[in-house]
Image: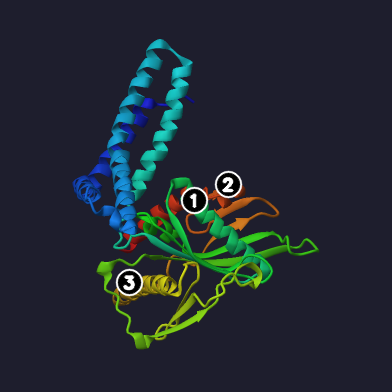
Amino acid sequence: MAVDFASEIKDLRQTMASVREVTDLERLRAQIAQLEQEAAAPDLWDDQERAQQVTSSLARANAELERITGMDSRIDDLEVLVEMGTEEDDADTMAEADRELVSLRKAVGELEVRTLLAGEYDPREAVVTIRAGAGGVDAADFAEMLLRMYLRWAERHGYPTKVMDTSYAEEAGLKSATFEVNVPYAYGHLAVEAGTHRLVRISPFDNQGRRQTSFAAVEVVPLIEQTDHIEIPENELKVDVFRSSGPGGQSVNTTDSAVRMTHIPTGIVVSMQNEKSQIQNRAAALRVLQSRLLLLKRQEEAAAKKELAGDVKASWGDQMRSYVLHPYQMVKDLRTEHEVGNTAGVFDGDIDAFIESGIRWKRSAERAEA
């Protein structure tokens, strides 16, 4: 069936008009101007960590502006390409136009999804924690597979990540892992990944080759910012120190540099061991604890509003995705019904379609509630 390029190009232009309407380009330009001013300061590199933050933020902001403003030029170029191919009846040119259309659909779709991220904390960076659930060693192995999946997803996009804590299981895999994704809107994108993930496969740890179902939980919270003012009194904290450990429980540090921080009123526990010193691990643990308390506060406020409105429906994200490797190959999101057969690609970080469909589904559910 021949592609209706005129209709497709019209749809792309309409979508971009909506994107520009929602996106505050003037604010983005003002942010770039401010960052350029900071980057030009002669003493910028006196504080290397701050300098890296400024230069990285500037590069990302410029890329975001170019991503939006450059899309119109790509659509114009596609229109010219189609006109040339049509006039000259050139199959190669039309094939090139078809490939560019597919690429543009994807790029414009990603921009459109960004406009749906209007939550209070959506623009934040993210802290992700993965915990092995029921399923023994298979669950621990599954948790490690999910950690790799998310890190590969971030790598595909050029997003910087930092693994903050890894607690290894005895035989294989991970009991838990915590990492940051340090890019704007990381929380908005990854929040839809929160919930219970289920793996079905022939267990590589079962010498009888039986099928095993295992579970892992994914928690996503927005990274705390200095303006949040989440104060935690010292008498509400219990802090334990211990030696960092590697796979199989082996010690990888000869000093008690790892930190386990417990918030006594809520029972929330945060462990950090991947920084070089106890002071750094304590600061990292406190930041993640503050992030979790911030999200807890938001959830409590939302629950109170729902109770006042008489809404008794369960939250939208418990068991949310199944990864089936036997007797067939399929990854399926149980909320959006989105599914793919390329399980290897998914575990290698190809999860954009799941994230995008999850964001659209969540936004649709929020509108329905409103």
Camera-nearest residue between 232 and 293: 232
Q: Earlier in the sequence, mark 3 or mark 1?
A: 1
- The furthest residue to the top: 88
For the residues labelled 2 and 3, the Cα–Cα distance comes to: 34 Å
State how the image is colored: rainbow
Left of 267 or right of it: where is 176?
Answer: right
CA neighbours of label 2 inside 10 A, class few (<14), some (14 to 19), many (20+) = few
Q: Quadrant of residue 314?
A: bottom left
Q: Position of residue 51 (x, y in %)?
A: 31, 54
CA neighbours of label 3 inside 10 A, class few (<14), some (14 to 19), many (20+) = some
**Residue at which label 3 appears:** 298
State the residue at coordinates (49%, 51%). 153
Q: Position of residue 281 (x, y in %)?
A: 44, 72
Helix, strand or loop status at disc 2? helix
The kind of residue on which mark 1 rests is: Trp
Helix, strand or loop status at disc 1? helix
Q: Which mark is residue 345?
A: 2
Q: Position of residue 102 (x, y in %)?
A: 44, 33
State the residue at coordinates (30%, 66%). 225
Residue 123 visible somewhere in the drawing: no
Q: Disc 1 or disc 2, which is closer to the eye?
A: 1
**Residue at which label 1 appears:** 153
The kind of residue on which mark 2 rests is: Gly
Q: Quadrant of residue 149?
A: bottom right
